[in-house]
Amino acid sequence: MYAEERQQAIAQQVAERGRLSVVELAQAYDVTTETVRRDLSALERLGLVRRVHGGAVPPHALSTLEAGLTERDRVQVPEKDRIARAALELLPPAGSTVVLDAGSTTARLVAEWPLDVRLTVFTHAVPLIGRLASLPQVDLHLLPGRVRPTTQAAVGADTVEALGRLRADVVLVGTNGLSPEHGLSTPDPEEAAVKRALVRAGRQVVVACDSSKIGQDALVSFAPLDAVDVLVTDAGLRDADRGRIEAAGVEVVIA
């Protein structure tokens, strides 16, 4: 079978079955997984499939499902703890300004916030407020907006406008998906608008996410990969994904 015939057959299978893994396709067509990945890259450029971690889905099959904060807090727990501790090492020196995104990883980071560094902190995440407000060395600012029950974070025009007036030394951002093609992404458009403003507000942008989100795409892209300075993730990151991320100019820290 010629490459063009195989790629056409793969595109048809993905369209019919909804999702196929690289391993399944390699076995079905008696080729290497590297060959399948090249096929999927070619098909993605044509808009016939979208690559995800370990395989491919139809091009329209971007996730619109969003787990609640409590549910997300129960998965990848050890990895998130290590990521949070590693991200703390990237906080700027005393007297600087930090903006914190909502999310289960940033909640862990705040739980171990340093007690001896005076920082100005802005956040739109309600769960972070209680801990930070109790720390005398933190000059805390709560961003305005409507609080979404799913993420317990403020969203909307007021939140975006407030972030547009900021220029912070470091912004710590979470994401539902990360890929070179779709960038950083999240299922909700309002949440995406706030995250987009968060990224623009930072002199240095640090993304903290576990490796299960890398190679995944959610519905709305809020930043290209080259807008990120540092990615903090866990040892589950595949070498191929790391190479593509670093090729975009992103420093990768493995927690």
Image (cartoon, grey):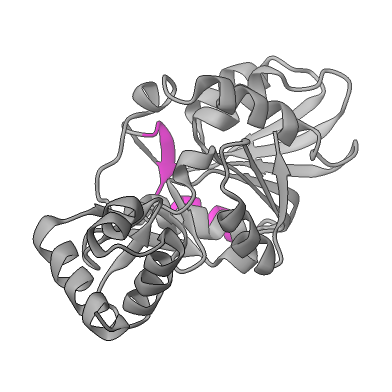
Q: Residue 226 location, x and y as percent?
A: 63, 68
Give the position of the C terminus as an image quadrant: top right
Q: Is residue 175 left or right of residue 166?
A: left
Q: Is residue 163 above or below residue 74?
A: below
Q: Residue 48 location, x and y as percent?
A: 24, 76
User: Which residue is at 72% across, 35% downward?
Assistant: 87
Q: Is residue 42 left or right of residue 81?
A: left
Give the position of the N terminus as an image quadrant: bottom left
Instruction: Say if residue 157 shows up in the picture.
Output: no
212 and 16: which is toward the camera: 16
In terms of image quadrants, where is residue 57?
bottom left
Instruction: Say if residue 96 shows up in the picture.
Output: yes
Q: Is residue 137 left or right of residue 181?
A: right
In terms of image quadrants, where is residue 248?
bottom right
User: How many circles with numbers are drawn on the protein?
Assistant: 0
Q: Is residue 170 above or below residue 4?
A: above
- Residue lying furthest top in this view? 134
Q: Is residue 135 above or below residue 224?
A: above
User: Which residue is at 41% across, 46% downward?
Assistant: 155
In terms of image quadrants, where is residue 228?
bottom right
134 and 110: which is toward the camera: 110
Q: Residue 110 location, x and y as percent?
A: 65, 24
The answer to if 159 sits in the magenta stretch is yes
- Magenta-highlighted residues: 151-165
Q: Is residue 225 left or right of residue 98?
A: left
User: Which residue is at 84% across, 43% downward?
Assistant: 96
The answer to if 195 sits in the magenta stretch is no
Q: Is residue 24 above or below residue 221?
A: above
Q: Residue 227 location, x and y as percent?
A: 63, 65
